[in-house]
Image (cartoon, rainbow, N blue to C red):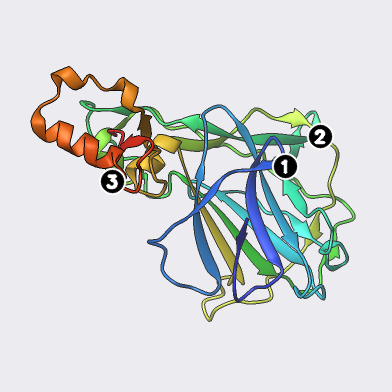
Amino acid sequence: MAVLPRVPGLSASILVKDTPLNEHDDKGCPVNLTTTAKFVEVTSGTEFEVWYRFSPPFPFDRPVSVKIVLDGKVVDEPLILASQLGKAKGHVCSGAVSNDTEDGWCEQAFVFADLEIGESIPEVPTQLDSVGTITLQFFFLNPVLKHTRNPKLVKKVMQLKDEVPEKAVKGDAITHQAGIKDPEMTSSVDVYDAKYADQDRAGNEIPFATFHFHYRSLEALYQLDVVERPREVHHLEEFDIDSMDAESLRDLFRKTLGRDKNNVSLYMQSSP
């Protein structure tokens, strides 16, 4: 799980089937005491959830909201009352909630989808800078007031991108995009009127913690050198000694005689 040195007691993860995705440090993330970034391994077609937990010494004296941003688009912002922050198992958001349909309250599940990449298609105007990243922003709130008559929360629309040119994602090894599924009925939620506790001079809200989760396929993480590619193991019996030249034989026997630390099995780096 991801944590922050400046915000002890707060942790966050991306879950698939109630299991946290494997996380790897983003070594290129600028050092910041209130912002962190992780790479996570994903597969297409899987629904995911956002999980976060508040534990001591995190202060339980005021409410908190969590802005959930998928590929640059805000899709939901759950509010946690001060009295509910210390929930032992943490808090889970599995989709965007709305109540503007005839069916009443609905939830649109979060899902990972393929990003189709073409080599010869023309450049597209679609902005791809934020694709491949889930961002969680945490805000302290001033005292909140519960709505007696719930306002309308509009159903979210998040259009998945069509095939994009290879050069548009080259270098970032972007392999997937995040989306939301069709609405399904869910139980009602309480809606509150709230104001952000911290704002800049322009009136923009200031988060006290930010988590970035860059999601990629495992192969993409190999290409980015985020994850070390496993080495193939070759045993001596696999080598055709009769077909090897003198230099290859000498190298093989040096390793066999223990002059290399891998004197039992020979390891060869896999090609990307």
- Left or right placement of residue 157 versus residue 238 in this view: right
In the foreground, 29 or 75: 29
Q: Which mark is residue 14?
A: none
Q: In the drawing, what numbered circle is on residue 171?
A: 3
Q: CA distance from mark 3 to mark 1?
A: 35 Å
**Would you say residue 43 is visible in this rendering?**
yes
Q: CA distance from mark 2 to mark 3?
A: 40 Å
Where disc 1 sits, the SS reads strand
Q: Is residue 174 among what the camera can see?
A: no
Pointers 1 and 2 in contact (CB under 8 A)? yes
Looking at the image, tell me whether mark 1 or mark 2 is earlier in sequence order. 1
For numbered disc 3, what is the local secondary structure? loop
Which sits earlier in the primary sequence, circle 2 or circle 3?
Answer: 3
- Picture quarter with the N terminus: bottom right
Screen quadrant of the C terminus? top left
Q: Amino acid at mark 1?
A: Val
Pointer 2 residue? 186
The three-letter code of the residue at mark 2 reads Thr
Outermost residue, front direction? 257
Q: Position of residue 52 (x, y in %)?
A: 70, 56
Task: Report the amino acid beneath label 3.
Answer: Gly
**Residue 84 percent coordinates (x, y):** 86, 61
Residue 144, image quadrant? bottom right
Going from N to C along the chain, the mark reached first, 3 or 1, is: 1
Left or right: 163 as drawn, with respect to 32: left
Residue occupying the far bottom of the picture: 201
Which residue matches tag 1?
Answer: 97
Q: Is residue 89 left or right of residue 65?
A: right
Under tag 2, what secondary structure? loop
Rendered residue at 69%/65% (across/down): 10
